[in-house]
Image (cartoon, rainbow, N blue to C red):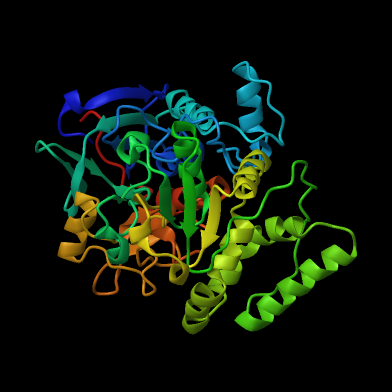
Amino acid sequence: MVRDRSLVTSLRRARAFGGAAPEAVRVAVVGGGASGVITALHLLRAATPEQPVEVCLVDREARLGPGLAYRHDHPRHTLNNYAGRLSAVAEDPDHLVRWCRAAGYDVDPTDFLPRTLYGDYLTDLVENAPVPTGSALGRVRGTVRDVLREDDGVHVHLTGGWSVVADAVVLALGNPPPARLMKYAAHAGYLPDPWVPDLAEQVGEPAEVLLVGSGLTALDVVSVLHDSTPMTRFTLVSRHGLLPRTHRTDPSPMRQTVDVPAGRLEEMVTQVRALVDQAATDGEDWRDVVDTLRASANRLWRGLDEEEQATFVRDHGRAWEVARHRMPPAQAEFVRQLKASGRLVVRTPGEVDPVAFDRVVNCSGPAPVTTRGWNPLVDALLDRGTIRPHRLGLGLDLDPTGRVVDSTGEPLPDVFAVGPARRGLDWEVTAVPDLRVQALEVAEEILPALEGRGGHSVTA
């Protein structure tokens, strides 16, 4: 599968005994963050001795698992959901909590874990994933420059002239940095990426910092910069002027169902508001309705026509994000104290003048995956027409099974996408429960579809 043995830095194989082993389906997963690791894990879980799979994870980082999301070690950078809801293993909701306890951490299902601990969990998952008989798991470290379909399979080309040959490729590309904001980029103190490791050093010791965006990323930046320079004053600016809502300390069990049939958008919105109002009347919590509803969010999204999807993005998307992606209680208390002291305010664009600030940090959220310039693979695939943007510009254009659609409108039979690249096909795409579903769907598509097309060994 790999054209040079020296590229494979780790390989575990479970060999078949008692007769000739069937040829394995070769799958290259491009990206070693959460979406790539969870996909690799579920591909192996779906394999059998009769249908083995050889998975090769390809990533430029030395360590698989944390990606961008789970490698920051600030004490206030915790997961924004309960530990009991973030198992990476489908059909095993207690897996994360058991793993933490086995590793010596006293964790309850309602805890908000440090993100670095979750990164450790993902790393351990891939390093110790069970490999079924006849299957294999390997990794290649390098930067992917192109993916080309040729007669003997799909070639994943890396810098240095090396390549990985597979029967199917899964693009687990992660998130790009924020888009360039022309209104603010001319500022002498503009910082385009809130996730650079030396952010506090780059910001220095200003008195006034403008954060463009008021979501969870902006609040993470506030935590880092406040600890560096406690007297800094922060202004968060966003079109809606809304902060994320707050998680409950002790959540109620999620409802089994929320009966909102897919259909006309405004009818759906009316029904959801009625459910929230009814929950309040019954002495329940609106968050229980939202948390249960999100399990149906992608079904509801796919039930909307193109015009209604565009209307949702324009008119309702931000309100859903604020209610859906909430602050942990400890972070909410930290924000409350800063607001009470006057060191944090939230404004809309018309209420601020960037010139009045010492530094401006772009916290507007990741750009769409199809943005040029952030990833050489994306640029190459766009140039050749192998991929094209979703019609709303949210992610890649995909068919209903997650296969990439090329510039002619044809789905590629052997190239799939998971993670942020799926935004548009689905609405909820980046949380761990969403990644579990995507990984299962891709595994179910790849193994039956490619049965009998197995090829060479991972270390050919």
Left or right: 286 as drawn, with respect to 389: right
Give the quarter of the image for residue 357.
bottom left
Q: Residue at the left extreme?
A: 161
Please give the name of the residue rendered at 76% of the width and 52% of the height, measured from the top-left corner: 254
Q: Is residue 50 visible?
A: no
In x, y percent, where is residue 21?
Answer: 37, 30
Total numbered circles: 0
Give the quarter of the image for residue 31.
top left
Q: Nearer the viewer, residue 225 or 326?
A: 225
Q: Residue at the top extreme?
A: 104
Q: Is residue 93 above or below residue 282?
A: above
Q: Nearer the viewer, residue 98 or 106?
A: 106
In x, y percent, where is residue 326?
Answer: 62, 51
Quadrant (top left/top right/bottom left/bottom right) for the C terminus: top left
In x, y percent, where is residue 164?
Answer: 21, 39
Q: Is residue 170 visible?
A: yes
Q: Is residue 352 above or below residue 104?
A: below
Quadrant (top left/top right/bottom left/bottom right) for the N terminus: top left
Please give the name of the residue rendered at 53% of the width and 32% of the height, measured from the top-left corner: 118
Please give the name of the residue rendered at 49% of the width and 32% of the height, measured from the top-left corner: 227
Please give the name of the residue rendered at 36% of the width and 69% of the height, measured from the top-left corner: 393
In x, y percent, where is residue 24?
Answer: 35, 38
Q: Residue at the right extreme?
A: 282
Left or right: 433 as drawn, with respect to 239: right
